[in-house]
Amino acid sequence: MKIKNKLTKEVLELSYVKFKEKFSKEIQQAYDSFKKTKVSKNFYKPICEAELESEFYFGLQWNFNHHGNSNWYIEKF
């Protein structure tokens, strides 16, 4: 996958495993934001944590780029 910095335009080529290691904090922040958004939309419907996490990782590129608060974004998955 290609990861690009918004400020410096630096590009990193990382495997999925290396990406999860290097950007674990940013992934967690994006997941927390995603979870908060989903819970607020489905206030009356209980949400299964496993389904929520699965949904987040299924759309990882979009979710990381839009819910994360990072200078890095996934350019190509």
Image (cartoon, rainbow, N blue to C red):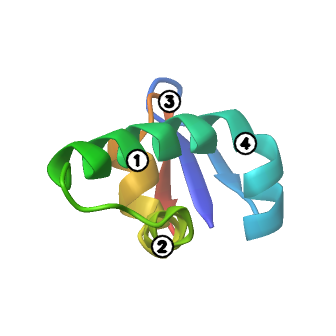
Residue at image location 72% in from the left, 42% down from the top? 24
Residue at image location 38% in from the left, 62% down from the top? 47
Q: CA distance from mark 4 to mark 1?
A: 16 Å
- Residue 10 visible: no
Q: Are marks 3 and 2 in contact (CB under 8 Å)?
A: no
Q: Looking at the image, is mark 1 or mark 2 earlier in the sequence?
A: 1
How crowded is the residue under tag 2: few (<14 C-alpha within 10 Å), some, or many (20+)?
few
Q: CA distance from mark 1 to mark 2?
A: 11 Å
- 38 vs 45, nearest the viewer: 45
Q: CA distance from mark 4 to mark 3?
A: 12 Å
Which label number is shown at residue 70? 3
Task: Kindly identify which residue carries mark 4.
Answer: 24
Left or right of 55 in this view: 1:
right
Name the residue type under label 3. Answer: Ser
Name the residue type under label 4. Answer: Ser
Residue at image location 54% in from the left, 34% down from the top? 29
Q: Looking at the image, is mark 1 or mark 3 earlier in the sequence?
A: 1
Name the residue type under label 2. Answer: Glu
Task: Kindly identify which residue carries mark 1.
Answer: 35
